[in-house]
Image: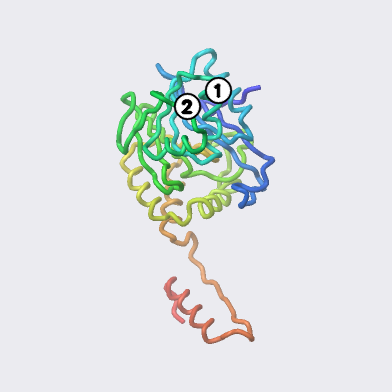
Amino acid sequence: MHCVRKVTEDLYWVGSNDRRLELFENIFPIQKGVSYNSYLLLDEKTVLFDTVDNAVGRQFLENIAAVLNGRTLDYLVINHMEPDHCALIEDLHLRYPDMKLIGNAKTFPMIDQFYGMDLGDKKIIIKEGETFSCTLHFVMAPMVHWPEAMMTYDETDKVLFSADAFGTFGALDGVIFNDEMDFDRDYLDEARRYYTNIVGKYGASVQTLLKKAAGLEIAVICPLHGPIWRENLSYILEKYQKWSTYEAEDQAVVIMYASMYGNTASAADALAGALAVRGVKK
């Protein structure tokens, strides 16, 4: 049984949710599960943006077949080659043998290593700033958070397919848009934890990406995990600005104390240094 949602007039969410997985990447606890987002565009040609984790593969394939409704799949845009987003590439290749794959120069060596697939003339290699079919523009996003990561911008509907950027932990509970939920209550902590664990150490790369995004007229942000942003986009953009520059969200003073068995003087100096960073005198 398929489960899909319309994002725009001709764009559909065809992803799925995993509430059984306990550890994301076998490291990070995800008590609220996780969503794997994928998007299918029905235009003169059909275009799928990324796939999903194998754990939800059956649901994903049913979703695609339902939206295509007899049409074939013409193109697959691969924004990110991490296994939770590329696991169904080979399955799609078998089901839609005429499908062409769109990626960058770092994408296809990974496909060769993962699958050993003979793609022949099915590969379309794009570069930064290139346009495909007049409306899709490609923005490289290396180390956000893998070296081959990129984003795709649909000029017609002003949709940014943002790969792992702007994502969150947490399954989508019946709704997929940020304005359909209480994001601060239900997802902000998961978004912050996701950023810290998955993208956090690549702040400089995120800053570069934010500068590129500033030059685009974006109406909708479609990440690979978590809610789709179609309202108040500045909220999540501002969060990423703060997080990627390691700026505190809240101004506060933390009082620490040294163990009587430790080096009290060293601890006091460390505390003074930390407070000085926040503009607080010793």
The residue identified by callout 1 is 64
Q: Nearer the viewer, residue 215 or 64?
A: 64
In the image, residue 137 sits, relative to residue 206, either above or below, namely above
The reply to whether dot 2 and dot 1 touch (C-beta < 8 Å) is yes
> Tag on residue 193?
none
Q: Is residue 178 visible?
A: no
Q: Is 33 placed left or right of 222 in the picture?
A: right
Which image quarter: residue 281? Answer: bottom left
Name the outermost residue toward the right: 20
Name above or below for residue 97 compared with residue 154: above
| x and y, in percent, of residue 116 in the image | 49, 33
Give the residue number, with chain letter if any, for mark 2.
48
Which quadrant of the view contains residue 91? top right
Structural crowding at the residue carrying mark 1, measured as other residues with C-alpha within 10 Å and reported as few (<14), some (14–19) or many (≥20): many
Q: Position of residue 88 (x, y in %)?
A: 55, 30
- Outermost top residue: 70
Q: Quadrant of residue 5?
A: top right
- Amino acid at the residue labelled 2: Leu
In percent of the image, x 54 and y 14: which residue is there?
A: 69
Dot 2: what SS?
A: strand
Q: Is residue 203 above or below residue 273?
A: above
The Cα–Cα distance between marks 2 and 1, rounded to whole angstroms, is 9 Å
Query: Is any part of residue 181 visible from this angle?
Result: yes
In what element is the residue under mark 1?
Answer: helix
